[in-house]
Image (cartoon, rainbow, N blue to C red):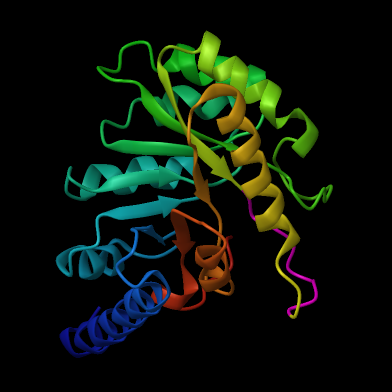
Amino acid sequence: MASQELAIRRQEILRNLASVRQRIEAILGGKREARLVAISKLKPISDIRIAYEDGQRHFGENYAQELVEKSKELPLDIQWHFVGPLQSNKCKMLAAIPNLWAVETIDSQSKADLMNKACASRESPLRVFIQVNTSKEESKSGVPPEECITILNHVQGNCPKLQLAGLMTIGAPNRDPKEPNPDFITLKNLQTQFQETSGIELELSMGMSDDFEEALKLGATNVRVGSAIFGERPPKH
């Protein structure tokens, strides 16, 4: 990328990142904190470096191989989130990334067990979120809401190399914008239900570029924002 193009790109990303941070702060008002995960899938390393130099540390990737390659090229204090569908044969690959901060897409007991086994040599347990298919769409990954508590209990009781961190949902894109997002409410209810029985308060990873503000209003502690920071993604070939 030519120096002039890079300078223009830098201004664009920094402007977008500042805007997203301001929108988050406008809702939270300093009363609590929420983590901004910059979703950088299919974006070049140069984009990530621009955001990193502006203090962004949490980044999310959807493809295991892309995450492995980027993690080798970028600073070790980046805290990576894997946010794509988790394939069983990718657990070892992900667990080997030293600065993998969390896997947000555990969607079955078997994958929890595989990830737990893959993390055997990690010094400390790996944070995991249970992905819930709150909208019950066939095209989406995630456990059905009615099976969520069972899997949470399984991870908590049987996966010592995993740290149960939270719940995650993507949510339905087509809904009535005048009504509270039912997907976020379902996730919040599951959080409350698990806390009442276990005493553990889980994080809520919900909200993306189009709806992170509403997610924050409904209790999100972790928002995954991509296009609002980096612009639209190119198609994956």
Q: Where is 150 relative to 41, above or below? A: above
Please name the predominant secondary structure of the magenta segment in the image: loop
Where is residue 235 drawn, in percent x and y?
Answer: 58, 68
Q: Is residue 17 visible?
A: yes
Which residues are drawn in magenta? 169-177
Eyeballing the image, is 212 above or below 122? below
User: Residue at (39%, 69%) from the top-left corner?
Assistant: 28
Compared across the picture, whether 232 is left or right of 37 comes to right
Indicate yes or no whether the magenta region holds residue 175. yes
Q: Nearer the viewer, residue 164 or 62?
A: 164
Which residue sits at x=34%, y=64%? Answer: 44
Image check: 227 left or right of 139?
left
Please tell me whether residue 22 is drawn above or below residue 148 in the rendered image: below
- Left or right placement of residue 167 versus residue 31 in this view: right
Q: Image check: 74 left or right of 229? A: left
Q: Quadrant of the N terminus?
A: bottom left
Q: How many marks?
A: 0
| 155, 41: nearer the viewer | 155
**Residue 121: in magenta span:** no
The quadrant holding residue 15 is: bottom left
Give the residue at x 21% y 50%.
74
